[in-house]
Amino acid sequence: MSERVCENCRWWSAGPTGYGYCRKRPPIVSNSDESFPSTHKSVWCGEWSDASITPEQEEMRELTRRFAVALINSGYDARNTWQVAAEFAAAETRVQREKGK
């Protein structure tokens, strides 16, 4: 995983002199001017998303995390919780792809 700084975030677009623009959200409109928030490449926020992985990989990670939380909340108690959650996530992804065909 990349270091959690703006420079390594999928939403950040480099600008001049170490600063860039966060494109996670729509531009901010003020005084009839539109612009994205400007940040320095060395900072980060809670919306940081690793630019070195694909959106599909990120989606699979999130789905696996959700299945793991659901398993734990349901009382499932095993050492292989994350493996089972990953299998559920992969199956869910396959089902979604098949529905899209």
Image (tube, rainbow, N blue to C red):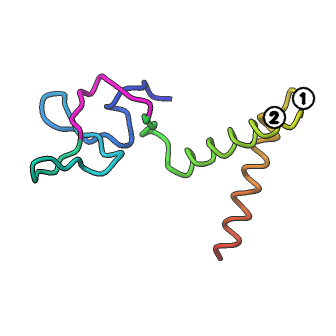
Q: Amino acid at mark 1?
A: Asp
Specify the segment rendered in magenta. Answer: 37-46
Query: Which residue in the rendered view is the most extreme toward the bottom?
Result: 101
Left/right placement of residue 54 relative to residue 65 reads: left
Instruction: Name the secondary structure under disc 1.
Output: loop
Q: What residue is disc 2 on?
A: 73
**Residue 45 lies within the magenta run:** yes
Residue occupying image coordinates x 63% and y 47%: 60
Residue 77: mark in rendering: 1
Residue occupying image coordinates x 90% and y 29%: 77
Q: Quadrant of the C terminus?
A: bottom right
The one nearer the camera, 41 or 66, is 66
**Residue 101 lies within the magenta run:** no
Q: Amino acid at mark 2?
A: Asn
Binning the other alpha carbons within 10 Å of mark 1 as few (below 14), some (14 to 19) or many (20 upward) gives few
Task: Tell me which corner region of the image, top left, top right, bottom left or bottom right, holds residue 95.
Answer: bottom right
Instruction: Name the secondary structure under disc 2.
Output: helix
Task: Tell me which corner region of the image, top left, top right, bottom left or bottom right, holds residue 75.
Answer: top right
Left/right placement of residue 78 relative to residue 62 reads: right
Residue occupying image coordinates x 35% and y 43%: 11
* Nearer the camera: disc 2 or disc 1: 2
* Image spot of residue 14 (x, y percent): 22, 38
* Image spot of residue 51 (x, y percent): 42, 40
